[in-house]
Amino acid sequence: MAGARVGGDPQLVTNGATRRTWRRLVRASNWHRYYQGALVGVDLLAALLATVIAVNLTHSPAAGFNTDDQLHFFYLTVWLVLPLAWLLALWGTGSYDRRYFGMGNEEFKRVIRASMFMLALVSFAALTFKADVSRVAVAVILLVAAVLVCGFRYGARYGLHKMRLAGKGVQRVLLIGAYPEALEVYRTVRRAPAAGLVPVGIYVTEGASSVRNLDTPVPVFAGTDVVTCAERLEADTLAVCGSASADAADLRRLAWQLEGTGRDLVVAPALTDIAGPRVHIRPVEGLPLLHVEEPKISGIGWLIKNILDISSSTFGLILLSPLFLAVAIAIKADSPGPVFFRQNRVGRDGETFSCWKFRTMYIDAEERQAALMMHNETDGLLFKMKDDPRITKVGKWLRRTSIDEFPQLINVVRGEMSLVGPRPLPAENGDFLGDVRRRLLVRPGITGLWQVSGRSDLSWDDAVRLDLYYVDNWSLTTDLQILFRTVAVVLRRKGAY
């Protein structure tokens, strides 16, 4: 990192060795300690509530504990030992690691690991001591505790997101590197406020003169001591961006310089939009090699996705048939024309299919589109207007509630679409060039990342970026998350027009 001079408190750094080793435990930002304390509280509450449910709602939970001493031991175990064991299991699996707060699935994966450990521990204890315990009570107390811990932690995460939107519980980040690379990282982290990363400055390692007259989103620094700069900005995290991380010696010296300051050092490589499960670090003689695996759009997870698509869609069509009938009557009463609108869309591997939707426009809508092109409020291959005069009264309600999309369950049953996937694009736009074609590796979906991230309010570039991210990082867990988030998005009706 050119220009990043090694300096700082001489009492802290001497030839790369920290004198006051105990100060490594002191962090520049301590918001996570309060959040960890809150998590301990909600986890303990979840374990105690699971005990309440198991003791009061299961038949003979204390079966096998007949004497008074045995009953005392049973209640001591379920009211004290098991809740404390839950906390220790969660701590042991890293469920209180601050790196996983607020974003991703890793926090909940670790909770599941703790649940598996508790199941193994209770089973081992029962076999070792030959305890004649109620299997139903054991199953209830462990299962309910796992569900409640996950549920309470989801609520805690929601509260953390609200705090971060208010500027609390965040990490103040100083970006280090060439200005274009640092700016790209800035834009990326600003798109995810829930991550709690707030860039407060950019430390330019090269080309500082070219940035001098630019209107930058955060202050830009160069030629000074990087740690002193971080102290001045009260930054608790330093992010080395792109090619700036290529100089191993400078990066190592910066890590030494930060020892004892309580500040985190992270590396933001030039490789973006690749999710964690595809990235693995393999150290070879001190050289961390970043392995990027191919997208796994196959296997048992993909088979389960297909089974869930067909079974859920078939059940949904049967369950929603009365609603379909009511909507059909309303559409016919509102304006002349067919109930359904079918349009050719591009599916997997570039094959076209007829996409089913409830008709929300007048029958001459496509002929009138040419006259409205100057009012198009989106870019790219789609046409969108918030106040489109071609939409009927019933159609506006159908779009706000997203009920117009429900007939696409027919496409899912026929194998042309999926419940979750990239947005299906109109076939009349012709061949898709460049990165857009990569979306065709999977079947298009009724819902997807773009729907739960802004829907029609997104630009074309953002929509494509989200669709490509989905394709490159697909997992069954991601699909389930998107389905869950879709419910909240539909109820808020944001971006639906």
Image (cartoon, rainbow, N blue to C red):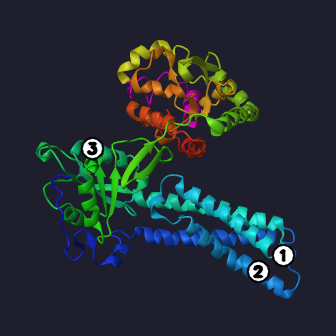
Q: What x and y, as percent, mark residue 412? A: 66, 28
* Mark number, residue 22: none
Q: Are marks 3 and 2 in contact (CB under 8 Å)?
A: no
**Is most of the magenta stretch helix, strand or loop?**
loop
Callout 1: few (<14), some (14-19), or many (20+) C-alpha neighbours within 10 Å? some
Can you say whether 278 is above or below 235 in the image? above
The residue carrying mark 3 is 181
| Sequence-earlier tag: 3 or 1 | 1
Q: Marks 2 and 1: CB-CB under 8 Å? A: yes
Side of 165 where 187 appears, left or right: left
Q: Nearer the viewer, mark 3 or mark 2?
A: 3
Residue 145: in magenta span:
no
Sequence-wise first label, 3 or 2: 2
**Residue 190 picture location, percent across and down:** 35, 48
Query: Label 1's element?
Result: loop
**Label 3 secondary element:** helix
Distance in Å between CA atoms under marks 3 and 1: 63 Å
- Mark 2 lies on residue: 75
Amino acid at the residue labelled 2 = Tyr
Amino acid found under the numbered disc labelled 3: Glu
Q: Going 27% across and 56% down the picture, which residue do you hit?
A: 251
Residue 3 visible (yes or no): yes
Magenta span: 376-401
Answer few, some or many: residues within 10 Å of disc 3's Cα (few below 14, many 20 plus, some between 14 and 19).
Answer: many
Name the residue that disc number 1 marks.
62
Towards the viewer: 480 or 262: 262
Q: Amino acid at mark 1?
A: Ala
Q: Residue at x 68, y 23 (%)?
A: 414
